[in-house]
Image (cartoon, grey):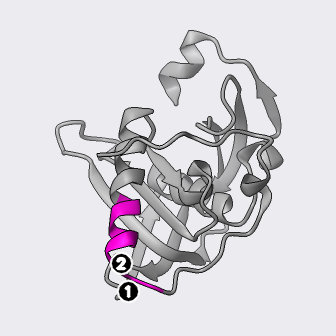
Amino acid sequence: MTIRKITTFPEEVLRQEAEPVEIFDEDLAKLIDDMVDTMREAPGVGLAAPQIGISKRIIVIEFGDEEDETVPNQLYVMINPEIIKESNDKVPGIEGCLSVPGVVGNVDRSLAVTVRGQNIHGKPVKIRAQGWLARIFQHEIDHINGVLYTDRAEEIWKPEQEDLDTI
């Protein structure tokens, strides 16, 4: 288990479009394990490779059922992910980011998305997500495209405790 240092704004890697992953090997598996450990340690619900200073199109997400907290969290690992479909319905929500500490913002995101990518073995995968899971996918995919949530936020502020409770 290796906890990586989280890259914070204004580091340049956060503003670059990440490179596609082409080699699926043990080094990739180790990087993904490190990303999952780093995300959990932070703690966060998602992490993109640029957030640990690596310009690769890799995201990890761990999230549970919004309605039923007794359902265990599910881990999603996507390599070279892209949103191929999104709902026209947008909803506002408060977002924060491990790479932009100390502030949160209100961001409109699509209520549902379909994401296509590859798994750790390079096999194609497709995920349909809605609600907060869809928001997390959009946030993390923005990272690999060099976009921060603050670019999309209608307003940004330093959170009070009640804001942190809703994130």
Question: Which image quadrant is residue 2 in?
Answer: top left
Q: Is residue 156 left or right of residue 82?
A: right
Residue at the image position 52 percent from the left and 59 percent from the top: 137
Write down the residue under mark 1.
122
Query: Where is residue 62 shown, x and y percent of the image?
Result: 36, 50
Q: Are marks 2 and 1 in contact (CB under 8 Å)?
A: yes
Q: Amino acid at mark 1?
A: Gly
Q: As rendered, which of 128 and 45 lies closer to the eye?
A: 45
Q: Is 28 covered by the magenta stretch?
A: yes
Residue 154 in the image, given as x and y percentages of width and height: 82, 39
Dominant SS in magenta: helix
**Label 2 sits on what residue type?**
Asn
Q: Along the horizontal axis of the image, is 5 left or right of 31?
A: right
Picture quadrant where residue 30 is located:
bottom left
Q: Residue tagged by mark 2?
A: 119
Visible in this render: residue 120?
yes
Q: Residue at 55% of width from left, 13% of height from top?
A: 162
Residue 97, image quadrant:
top right
Q: In this rendering, is residue 88 above or below 68?
A: below
Q: Does 122 appear in magenta? A: no
Q: Secondary structure at mark 1?
A: loop
Query: Residue 2's mark?
Result: none
Span shown in magenta? 23-32
